[in-house]
Amino acid sequence: MSSELIPLIEIKDLYRTFKSGESDVDVLKGVNLTIMPGEFVAIIGASGSGKSTLMNLLGCLDKPTKGQYLFNGIDVATLDQDELAALRREAFGFVFQSYNLLSGETARGNVEVPAVYAGLSRAERHQKAEALLSRLGLADRMDHKPNQLSGGQQQRVSIARALMNGGHVILADEPTGALDSQTGEEVMKLFADLSKQGHTLILITHDAKVAAHADRIIEISDGIITKDPQSSSNDDLSAVVKPAPILNPRPGNVFTHLAEALRMSLTALTGNLFRTVLTLLGIVIGVASVITMLAIGDGARQSIVDRISSMGSNLLLVRPGGPNQRGWGATTLIPEDALAVRELPGVAAAIPEQGGTVTLRAAERDHRTEVLATSADYSAFRNWPVAYGTFFLHGG
């Protein structure tokens, strides 16, 4: 049966080039690699050697610049976005150095996250998450949040999360980097047990001691595989090999996804209530400030418009004097001139004005002000209503 196994992962002449300004940087340079089902492989290299970029390509988180990537005999380049998402969801489990757990969720809630995207019901997710956590020795820590767990326990939660949808291929990027040596050994023993159960493990590390736990160690440097021992024969692989997943880009129930998104949002908001209240208060103050400033600006603009309108945009002031310095033309105006102007076509009113600066005296106090003598129509055309008092009557 094992002789019929085909490579689970096969990459041929793979390149990955990044743009850096106007120049191209080749991170991977013609990588060739074959991984059989059930293998425990360690890819070791120094920082900048391209191992993390290779892991992103193997996990379908990135696309190669050129070359071919076959997963279970299928060319990944031929898959559309939904099929790639289904492949990531059902075939791969990711374990990170920094765990990447949701701080507002319990251990069980973190493990259930991949199953939400897989469309499992809530009861199925609970049952499967509890079984995985119990299997990894966290039966009494299911309702604890990440900050209540040790580093090793958090890494176990992330491993359970990677196994939630099957975990046919587990990609671990420096999984022991944030752990002490004893806890790191426990995690590596756990990986070895998973390999014996048929999972394919790909370990990314720069530590030779960690890589030594793998059955096959691949060395990479400057984007080129410099050492790759012959793959174990099919007969040496574990007899328990998990079948490769069948791509199933099912969309799932939209309402279920919306309900889960709402639940996770509420959990995140209530997880740190004081911070949420402060954030909402800041938003309210910010919006209120914007509205207030707009209202003040609009009020000031309207006030200026009203003042300009009160001056009259259709008023014409006529002063006595000649059009030139030769002495001809009118040099004074009389009340009869206002009556004559009023008779002209297009003139609504002609109002005489006579004014100057005077001194007002009350008791022993003097005050200089302006006095304007005009007709009773002045206030109506200037839009200056009289606050109190009356105008002088003609002949009064």
Image: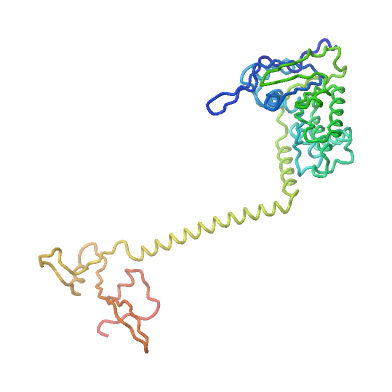
Identify the residue at the far bottom of this view: 363
* Residue 284 picture quarter: bottom right
Note whether residue 14 is visible. yes
Q: Residue at x 69, y 21 (%)?
A: 221
Image coords of residue 36 (percent x, y)? 79, 16
Image coords of residue 302 (percent x, y)? 43, 61
Give 374 or 240, whichever is nearer the viewer. Answer: 240
In the drawing, does residue 362 fall left or right of residue 191? left
* Residue 167 picture quarter: top right
In the drawing, does residue 181 fall left or right of residue 59? right
Q: Residue at x 86, y 29 (%)?
A: 190
Give 122 or 141, whichever is nearer the viewer. Answer: 141
Q: Quadrant of the N terminus?
A: top right
Note whether residue 83 is visible. no
Q: Quadrant of the C terminus?
A: bottom left
Give 93 or 391, whichever is nearer the viewer. Answer: 93
> How many badges with numbers are in the image?
0
* Residue 95 picture quarter: top right
Image coords of residue 182 (percent x, y)? 86, 34
Identify the residue at the far top of this view: 3
- In the displayed structure, 211 sits above or below 339; it is above
- In the displayed structure, 358 sits above or below 17; it is below
Image coords of residue 325 (percent x, y)? 12, 65
The colour scheme used to paint the residues is rainbow
Q: Residue at x 25, y 75 (%)?
A: 354
In the drawing, does residue 66 fall left or right of residue 212? left
